[in-house]
Structures are given as C-alpha cells and as structure tokens.
Image (spheres, rainbow, N blue to C red):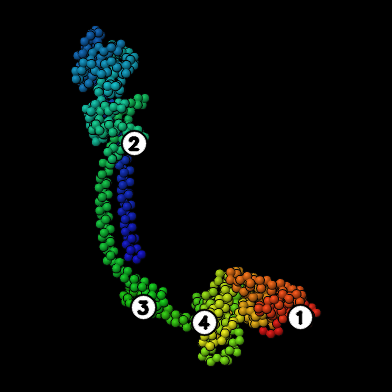
C-alpha cells in the first residue's frame, strides 16, 4: 500500500471516528437527557393532577357543606319533608356536578339531580359499591373514585346531621362527576402536551388524545408497568401508570409522552453534524491530494533508489536538490550508495581470494580482523588429487591450469552448497571447514555430504576431460571432527583467516591414508559418531606418524539409501575378518578376505595377514603402525 493511501486512510479514519463519536454522544446523551426530562414531566403532571383533584374535592365538599348547613335546609330536614329536590338541584348547579343524590339513613334515594336530566343515572342501584354506609356511620366527609361497569366517577360524600355536633348522620349527600373527556380537559388544562388516558378495567373512560392512541396506551400496560416505555407506530413513548387505589388494580390513569418526537431536534442536529463533517472530509481529501503529491514524490524517488540498491545497483543516485528534510535524506542516500559501491568492489575482489562466508563474517564483525583466534568444535576436510605430480609433468602448462581450474571450481561449488568454508588451495589440494554457526550444529553431516558430492561431480567431469585428452583424475579425501583454533593467523603484513590444530593435521593424514587402503573418503572416530544417515565401515586401528596412541579409522561409503546390498555384504564380511585379525587369527581372517579381492581395504588387510602369518609378532595389540605419511 502506497504512502498516499496510508495517509489518506489515516485522515479518513480519524475524521470519521471523530464524527461517529460526536454523533454517538449526541444520540446517547440526548436520549438519556430527554428520558430524564420526560420522566420529570410525568411526575410533575401526576403531582399537579393530584393537587387539582384534591382542590376540586375540597371545593365541592365546601359548597355542599355550606348549603346543607343553611338554617332553612336544616329546618326542612327536621320536618322530614319528601321533596328535597330544590336543595339537591342547588347543590348540583353550584358544584357543576353530573349527579347529586340525597340518601336517608337506610341508603334510600330521597332526591336526585341529574345535569342532563337522566331519569335513571347508572349508579342509582349500585350504592353498595359506594360504601355509603361507612359515611353514614362515621359522619365524616370523604371523596373517592368509584369504579362501576358503566364508568368511572369522582364521588364526594357529605353526611347530613340533625345537630352539627352529632357523630352520626341521618342522611347523605352524594355528589358525582363522571370521568370523561371534558372532565379530563378541564382538570389537565395545564398539562395538555402529555397524552393522558383514564381507564376502568380494560376500557378507556377518558382521554385527551385520539381513540387509537388511547387504545394503544391501554394495550401496553404490561410494558408500562415493567419498563415505563412502549412503542407504537414505530415511535417510542415514556409512560407512567397511576392507580386511584392500590387495592383496586382496575381503575387509574396513564400519562405518556412521545420520546422520538422530543428527540427530533437532536436528530436534526445530527444531520447538520453529518453534513458539516462530510464537508470537512471532502475538503480535507482535496487538500490531501494537493499536499501529498509534494510529500510522496521525493519519497518515491528514495524508494526506487532503495530498490535499486537492494538489487545490487550501487551506481544509482537520487536527483533531488531541495534543502528540506527530504533533500537531506536524498543527499545522505547518495553518500551511502557511494560507500556501498566502494565496499562492493572490495567485497567482490576479496571474494576471489577468500571464501565469501569468511568475508561476510569479517565485514559483519570487524573485530575479528585482529590477530587471534577462538577454540571451536567443527569439522575439517582435506582433499588431494592422486598422482598429480606424475600427470602434471606430461601436460602443457595451459592445459594443466585449465583442468585444475575446472576441477577446483567444481569442488569449491560442492563445498559451498553444503555450507562449507573454503580455507585455502595448496596446489591441487583443498582445505575446507564447517562451522557450527553456519550448519546449525550438523557440521559433520554437511562435511560428509560435501565429500560424497565431490566424488559424484568428479565422475561427471572425467568424460569431459578424457574427450580432450586429459588424464583420469582421482581424489582422496580425509575428514576429521574436533576442537580447533579458528581466527586470523599470520603477521601484521600478511594474515589468513584459517583453522589450526591437531584435528586439522589429522584430517590431512587421513587423506594420505586412503592410498594405503584403496579408499576415496576416510573419516575419524568422532566424525563417525556424529553423523547420521550414512553407511561407514571401520577400516582399522592405526598409529600414524607423530602420534603415540592408536586411532580407529573409517571409510565413508555413501548415504544410507544409496548403498546396495552387495556392498553391504562386503562391509559385513570385512568387519568379520577385521575382528579375527585383531584376535590374531590371521589365517581365518585371510580366508575371508581372499573372497573380497575386488575390495581395496580387503586386499590391504589380506596382504598384512599373509605377512603376519610368516612373521608372527611376539606381542599383538591389533594396532597397525604407519611408518610414512
């Protein structure tokens, strides 16, 4: 992804995130604020309704009491007249009541006033629901909401007493107002913005909203009681239910307000924020396109230059002359490219004389350029061309150099492919070693694989040399593993990054021992112990020149999956003969070895067994002493 795209995506995400956070805060905070405000309005409306209802009750009670306390009425009451209608009518008109009843002490209706002139009001035969007997017995005025099948009524009870100081009543005035839309509109004139629904059971008895809305409010009573919110026509409403009496769950009223309508102002604000944010985003994108080109063009030049350097083109330079920070970076890049070009020239020249792996290590760790070394456990290989002196005298110098260069290039390639480090050429001889750091600890395995690959490569080159009249070249290889000193060895004027030690000398001796046993690759005991996946043969225990103790030597046959059964049988019979030879049973060993005449080590050991049968030593330890190299 280009830098332009990254900068634009960062800008876009930042502005979009800020816009989304703003919209989220407006939405969530505004909604929470409106919910709290509406709940407060509902509580205030409930308080105001209760206050107005109590004021109405007191007013009706006061007016009725004034009329019934009148001397004329009391003298009329004392005479027990039958026609009390004028007094009842007066009370009804003064209190704007829908119905006024006058009851005697037996709860029988003695007089009735109806605002609309109904001959039989719906509650006339339901005074048992009004609990009038309680008012007659107590002689105390009271007011309550009375729930009947026919409707809901605001009722007021004023006891009639012969003497104002009596504790009992001889009659009762009942003033009733039916709860209907007109009564609600009058009582809730100060809170007409709220939807109010009075209910009696499952019926709407009064409302200040549409019938559909009232029915919806009533149908959502479970949601209102549980959550205080309901949805209708895809809009949310905050609501509160109030019962007139806790013991009567059938009658009460519900106050509600439209939450989504209250939030419309904030929704408009959100739309404005979106428009403004979109405009900022568009303007920012245009400015970004103008500015980013000035920023990214020189960066693209530097990126291109970096890729050129990565691909090895150290001659590449960046043409950017401005004095800003990018210009300073371009100048620093050009200086770096010049330094790399110079170092690459040194490296390419150095690689022709020293193994590239050593060059890389010395360049990455310049402190190793100082004289000195360190002890390491690693594997070293020596190889030499058999009979080189003989055929080199017969070939012209040009042909000899050509063959030798071809041979050394091919062998060096096989060593490098197996992570080996070419130490030096000694005429036709090659010295290489395998460091644990480069081989993940499997240095002995890699050395053996390299030796086998060198022999296979030589088999491929022989026909090519033979076609040009060249000699048949055979190579002997010795491999030893152990501790040796690795580092810069030499003088201040001339030095070599190499390895020295007893194991290095021993690998050279093993290479020479191949000619005595007719083998191609010989390894020491430690190499044989560390490698896996190879077939090796124990050849002998020898005491080489310069060593007191005997050393067991082995022949590297090949990789385990490449050695055939015939060769394995030869190895097995040879090992049987070697065991007999070490037990001084030379005749039995010779008998077995005589059947292996095609095998070089068997011929060598057979000749030795025959000589020992003629000249049996006085003491025998199974170790053969090599008198020459």
Q: Nearer the viewer, residue 357 or 265?
A: 357
SS assignment at label 1: helix
Q: CA distance from mark 4 to mark 1?
A: 45 Å
Picture quarter containing residue 483?
bottom right
* Label 1 or label 2, whichever comes before in sequence order: 2
Q: CA distance from mark 3 to mark 4?
A: 36 Å
Q: Which residue is mark 4?
A: 409
Which mark's residue is nearer the viewer, 4 or 1? 1
Q: Residue extending furthest front? A: 595
Q: Which residue is mark 1?
A: 612
Q: Residue extending furthest right? A: 618
Q: Is residue 282 above or below residue 471?
A: above
SS assignment at label 2: loop
Alpha-carbon neighbours of circle 2 within 10 Å: few (<14), some, or many (≥20)? some
* Label 3 or label 1, whichever comes before in sequence order: 3
Alpha-carbon neighbours of circle 3 within 10 Å: few (<14), some, or many (≥20)? many
- For the point 64% across and 75% down, the residue is 555
The quarter of the rendered structure image containing the C terminus is bottom right
């Amino acid at each position: 992804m280009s830098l332009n795209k990254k900068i634009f995506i960062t800008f876009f995400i930042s502005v979009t995130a800020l816009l989304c956070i703003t919209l989220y805060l407006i939405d969530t905070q505004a909604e929470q604020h409106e919910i709290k405000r509406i709940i407060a309005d509902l509580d205030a409306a409930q308080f105001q309704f209760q206050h107005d209802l109590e004021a109405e009750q007191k007013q009706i009670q006061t007016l009725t009491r004034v009329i019934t306390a009148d001397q004329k009425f009391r003298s009329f009451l004392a005479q027990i007249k039958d026609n009390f209608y004028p007094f009842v009518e007066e009370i009804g008109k003064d209190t704007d009541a829908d119905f006024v009843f006058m009851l005697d002490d037996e709860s029988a209706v003695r007089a009735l006033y109806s605002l609309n002139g109904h001959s039989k009001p719906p509650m006339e035969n339901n005074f048992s629901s009004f609990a009038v007997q309680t008012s007659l017995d107590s002689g105390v005025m009271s007011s309550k909401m009375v729930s009947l099948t026919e409707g809901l009524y605001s009722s007021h009870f004023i006891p009639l007493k012969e003497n104002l100081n009596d504790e009992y009543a001889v009659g009762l005035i009942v003033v009733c107002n039916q709860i209907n839309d007109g009564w609600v509109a009058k009582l809730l004139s100060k809170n007409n913005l709220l939807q109010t629904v009075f209910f009696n059971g499952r019926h709407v008895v009064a409302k200040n909203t549409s019938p559909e809305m009232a029915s919806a409010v009533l149908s959502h009573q479970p949601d209102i009681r549980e959550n205080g919110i309901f949805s209708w026509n895809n809009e949310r409403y905050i609501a509160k239910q109030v019962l007139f009496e806790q013991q009567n769950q059938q009658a009460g009223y519900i106050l509600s307000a439209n939450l989504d309508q209250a939030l419309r102002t904030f929704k408009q604000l959100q739309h404005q924020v979106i428009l403004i944010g979109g405009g900022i985003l568009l303007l920012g994108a245009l400015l970004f396109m103008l500015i980013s080109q000035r920023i990214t063009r020189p960066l693209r030049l530097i990126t291109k230059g970096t890729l050129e350097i990565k691909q090895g083109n150290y001659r590449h330079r960046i043409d950017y002359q401005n004095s800003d920070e990018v210009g300073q970076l371009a100048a620093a890049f050009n200086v770096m490219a010049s330094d790399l070009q110079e170092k690459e020239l040194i490296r390419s020249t150095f690689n022709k004389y020293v193994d590239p792996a050593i060059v890389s290590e010395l360049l990455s760790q310049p402190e190793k350029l100082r004289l000195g070394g360190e002890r390491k456990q690693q594997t070293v290989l020596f190889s030499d061309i058999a009979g080189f002196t003989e055929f080199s005298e017969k070939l012209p110098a040009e042909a000899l150099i050509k063959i030798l260069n071809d041979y050394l290039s091919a062998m060096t390639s096989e060593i490098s492919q197996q992570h080996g480090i070419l130490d030096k050429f000694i005429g036709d001889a090659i010295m290489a070693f395998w460091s644990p750091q480069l081989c993940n600890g499997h240095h002995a395995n890699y050395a053996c694989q390299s030796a086998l690959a060198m022999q296979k490569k030589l088999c491929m080159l022989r026909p090519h040399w033979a076609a040009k009249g060249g000699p048949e070249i055979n190579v002997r290889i010795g491999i030893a593993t152990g501790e040796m000193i690795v580092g810069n060895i030499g003088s201040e004027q001339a030095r070599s990054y190499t390895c020295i030690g007893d194991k290095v000398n021993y690998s050279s001796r093993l290479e020479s021992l191949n000619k005595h046993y007719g083998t191609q690759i010989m390894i020491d005991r430690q190499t044989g112990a560390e490698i896996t996946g190879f077939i090796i043969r124990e050849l002998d225990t020898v005491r080489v020149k310069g060593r007191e103790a005997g050393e067991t030597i082995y022949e590297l046959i090949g990789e385990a999956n490449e050695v055939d059964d015939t060769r394995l049988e030869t190895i097995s019979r040879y090992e049987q003969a070697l065991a007999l030879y070490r037990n001084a049973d030379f005749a039995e060993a010779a008998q077995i070895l005589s059947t292996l005449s095609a095998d070089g080590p068997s011929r060598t050991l057979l000749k030795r067994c025959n000589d020992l049968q003629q000249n049996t030593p006085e003491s025998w330890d199974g170790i053969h002493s090599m008198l020459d190299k």
